[in-house]
Amino acid sequence: MNANTAAGAIRKRKPDWLKVRLPGGDAFFTLKHKLEKNGMPTICQNARCPNIHECWNGNQATFLIMGDVCTRDCLFCAVASGRPAPLDASEGHRLLQVIRLMDLGYAVITSVTRDDLIDKGSSHVASVIRTLKQDRPQMKIEVLVPDFDGGSQWLDRVLDAGPDVLAHNVETVPSLYDRVNRRADAFGHSLQVLEHGKKRGWITKTGLMVGLGETAREIEALFAVLRERGVDVLTIGQYLQPDGRSLPVSRYYTPGEFSALKESALGHSFIGVESGPFVRSSYHADRLFKTVSHALSRIQ
């Protein structure tokens, strides 16, 4: 990979490989109707994911629970920040209806951060998982959680509900946390989530954005730290500025650089890696799960 820092000149125009196809197609609009009918938001829409055309036409979506307003205001994220609405106790059943309509064998669930709640919303997340597992015990569930302010007791509530994959995104290298996350302790909390989940026996997964000003050396150091904490699966994608108030892109990585990042990550012994300009944390999640499950079963 390029050893230069990502602090170079900002490119005002996106390169050709970052052109996004406009969403459309019969399957896309069929799924859109199912989601709207059941009042089920997705991170695909709220975070303006560039893969929405591909995923929705492939009958895949990442469901967003606990509302669509986050209590944090991270400068890389398109999700609205402010005062969230009260939790909806029927949310698990509404999500179940959508999953039945989609006939999913693998579901990815994420949430906004709810620092306004005493337990950070962990009981609600656990309740949603139990509702789905009770009705569809064979379905695999990947849950992408916030950091719960580092509270292992809140994470334990979620794990006790029995998801199959624990995901939590570190997002960037430690040196950029003050800029990106606005919380100096956030990186430590992220590591605590991932390490605690691995110690309890879960497949653990994290996501990294590049193009925010990180260096090659910092990325390599982060790979090493994540593997030391037992992280199994890594996704690496290009940061894309969602709006005018968000952090600008420092630079755009080439497809070749993403391939080199994948090889480097595999060299650190991550079991599953997705790396590319449009890769996001739940991209090809079901395929990665199968890859990792097979590899772990061979080890055991």
Image: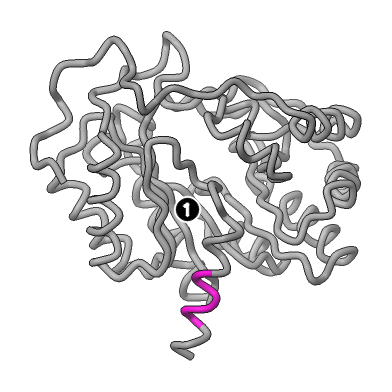
Report the label total: 1
Q: Measured from the top left, where is residue 121 in percent x and y?
A: 68, 45
Work out which residue is located at the far bottom of the displayed protein and give it. Answer: 300
Q: Tell me if mark 1 has few (under 14), some (14-19) or many (20+) residues whose alpha carbon lies within 10 angstroms of its own.
A: some
Q: Nearer the viewer, residue 169 or 249?
A: 249
The magenta stretch spans which residues? 291-296
Q: Measured from the top left, where is residue 146 in percent x and y?
A: 54, 46
Occupied quadrant, residue 253: top left
Work out which residue is located at the far left of the displayed protein and give it. Answer: 4
- Residue at the image point whose x is 20% and y is 36% from the top: 214
Query: Eyeballing the image, is 48 above or below 99?
Result: above
The stretch drawn in magenta includes residue 262 = no
Occupied quadrant, residue 232: bottom left
Determine whether, in the image, residue 54 is placed left or right of residue 50: right
- Residue at the image point whose x is 38% and y is 32% from the top: 181
Query: Eyeballing the image, is 9 above or below 26?
Result: above
The stretch drawn in magenta includes residue 293 = yes
Q: Nearer the viewer, residue 52 or 250?
A: 52
Q: Is residue 11 among the parts visible in the rendering? A: yes
- Residue at the image point whose x is 64% and y is 24% from the top: 23
Occupied quadrant, residue 113: top right
Q: Secondary structure at mark 1?
A: helix
Amino acid bearing label 1: Gly
Question: Is the magenta region chiefly helix, strand or loop?
Answer: helix
- Residue at the image point whose x is 22% and y is 58% from the top: 264
Determine whether, in the image, residue 158 is placed left or right of residue 300: right
Q: Measured from the top left, where is residue 45 in percent x and y?
A: 65, 27
Q: Measured from the top left, where is residue 229 in percent x and y?
A: 35, 67
| Pointer 1 residue | 150
Query: Eyeballing the image, is 249 above or below 238?
Result: above
Which of the colour schemes (rainbow, by chain, secondary structure, one colour) is used? one colour
